[in-house]
Amino acid sequence: MTTPDVDPAVAALSKSLLPESDQLALGMAERIREEVRLYRDAEIVSDEELVESCQDNLRYVLGSLAGYPVRSDPPRRTGVARAERGFPTPLSSRRTGSVAASSGSCSSRVPGRASATSC
C-alpha cells in the first residue's frame, strides 16, 4: 500500500489520536447504533463486533494518515463478514462513523481533549 500525501498537521493529529483509538471507537459504535437503523438490533451485529470493527477501521484510517504502514484487511474483513450474513453495510454507517470521528461526539470519553479533535 502506498502512503497517501497527508498534510503534516493531519498526520500529527492522527498519530496523537492512535493511542486513544479504542476509546474513540466506543463513541463511534454508540453513535452508529443510535443513528443507523440497520445497526439497532444487537442480534444482527453484536455490540462487541460493532466496537471491534470500529476499532480496527479507526486504527486503519489513523495509522494510514499518520504515515504508518497499514494493511487493508480491517475494512475488507468487516465488509466480508457482513456480506456473508447477508447484512448490507449501509453508507450511512460509514458517514455516521466518520462524523463521530470528526465532530467530537465522543469527547466526554477522552478527558483533556478539545472537542474539535477528540474523536
Image: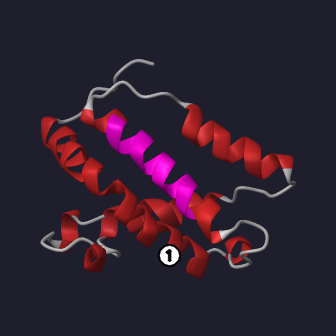
Q: Is residue 84 above or below residue 26?
A: above
Q: Residue furthest front?
A: 48
Q: Where is residue 118 shown, x and y percent of the image?
A: 24, 66
- State left or right for residue 108 relative to residue 97: left
Q: Nearer the viewer, residue 32 or 95?
A: 32
Magenta stretch, residue numbers: 51-63
**Would you say residue 54 sits in the magenta stretch?**
yes
Q: Is residue 116 above or below residue 35?
A: above
Assign the magenta stretch its main secondary structure: helix
**Would you say residue 47 sits in the magenta stretch?**
no
Q: Where is residue 40 shown, x and y percent of the image?
A: 69, 79
Tag 1 residue: 31
Q: Residues within 10 Å of mark 1 (few under 14, many from 20)?
A: some
Check disc 1 and report its element: helix, strand or loop: helix
Residue visible at 52% across and 61% down in the picture? 95
The C terminus sits in image quarter: bottom left
Q: Where is residue 23 shown, x and y percent of the image?
A: 36, 65
The N terminus sits in image quarter: top left
Q: Where is residue 62 shown, x and y percent of the image?
A: 34, 43
Q: Is residue 45 above or below residue 80?
A: below
Identified by mark 1, the residue type is Arg
Q: Nearer the viewer, residue 25 or 95?
A: 25
Quarter-of-image position of residue 44: bottom right
Q: Nearer the viewer, residue 19 or 16?
A: 19
Quarter-of-image position of residue 49: bottom right
Residue visible at 35% across and 55% down in the picture? 21
